[in-house]
Amino acid sequence: MTLNKLRLAGVLLLTVLSNWAVVAEVSKGANALPIFDAHIHYSHDVWDAISPGDAIQRLREVGIKRAMVSSSSDEGTQRLYQADPSFVVPSLRPYRKRGTIESWMYDETIIPYLKERLEKYRYAAIGELHIDGEQAYTPVMQEVIRLAKKYQLVLHVHSDAQAIKFIFEQYPEAQILWAHAGFDYAFVVGKMMDKYPNLMADLSFRGEIINEGRLMKAWRILLTRHADRFLTGIDTYEPQRWLQIKNAMRWQRDLLSVLPKDVARKIAYENSERITRLFDARNNLETE
Ligand SMILES: [Zn+2]
């Protein structure tokens, strides 16, 4: 090997090593990023097994610094909030118990329940609530939308794209966090976000968009293009899920590690400001 070739090989080796170093630094950075989890539930069948202090500790252990919490009934959210008001951002669910996600929008007794809670406690959002298509126009859902408007609350909505359109028809200034990004395709979510500047989405249960460390191209483009609209979320929708927090966080960290650093930082935490801004402002007013 000539001296020049040796030099070239040396340069190549250095380049490869420094690229590795960059990759290592990016993933180490992603592992250290503080997380806002937009999708935590602490429902009645979890309280007895996992105390509020224990629940918060489990979430903190995986790097979550703050979380939006809702529960069936709202009692769980309030218990968790009491345990650590700086950690919990409360969201009011229209469910008093498990098993009403398909019928709640026809139950008019939900409205006095919501009104009573809204009078008594402070929230950042209403939801997570489940709705599809024209159910967005049931009298109960119309009233929920009016309450969101009156109390300036984000709507955390698990629905198809149609229901999101129908909510914006009724309340064009709505701030909507679309749970699981509607379980929809990147191009649909992208079109919806282009059309509605106040539409955000959480990525809970969307592990399929990343496979063996490779993020689907359409999602890479979408998450970069609308980097200020997405949040992460574990979704502790049933008691068992509390035992899977580390696994759920692992794929989210994988996702963050393959995104550009500034995009990862936004999705991991910074975008939560859009959800907590009014809630924090109201709380600060109170303590001043
Ligand atoms: Zn959920």
Image (spheres, rainbow, N blue to C red):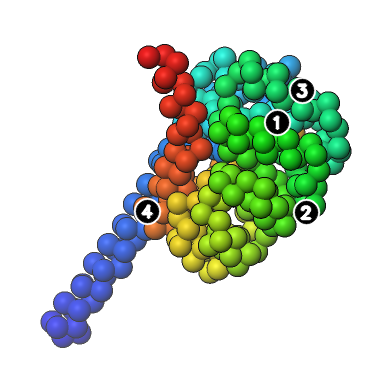
Q: State the image quarter where residue 44 is shown.
A: top right
- Distance between the Cα atoms at labels 2 and 3? 24 Å
Label 2 sits on residue? 133
Q: Amino acid at mark 4?
A: Lys
Front of the two marks 3 and 4:
3
Front of the two marks 3 and 1:
3
Does residue 100 lie above or below 283 as drawn? below
Q: Which of the labelled discs sits on residue 93, or is there none?
A: 1
Front of the two marks 2 and 3:
3
| Few, some or many residues within 10 Å of mark 2 (<14, 14–19, 20+) | some
* Marks 3 and 1 close (CB-CB < 8 Å): no
Does residue 254 lie above or below 154 as drawn? below
Label 4 C-beta lies within 8 Å of the nearest ligand 1 atom: no
Q: Is residue 69 left or right of residue 166?
A: left
Label 4 sits on residue? 261
Give the residue displayed 52% in from the left and 46% down from the top.
231
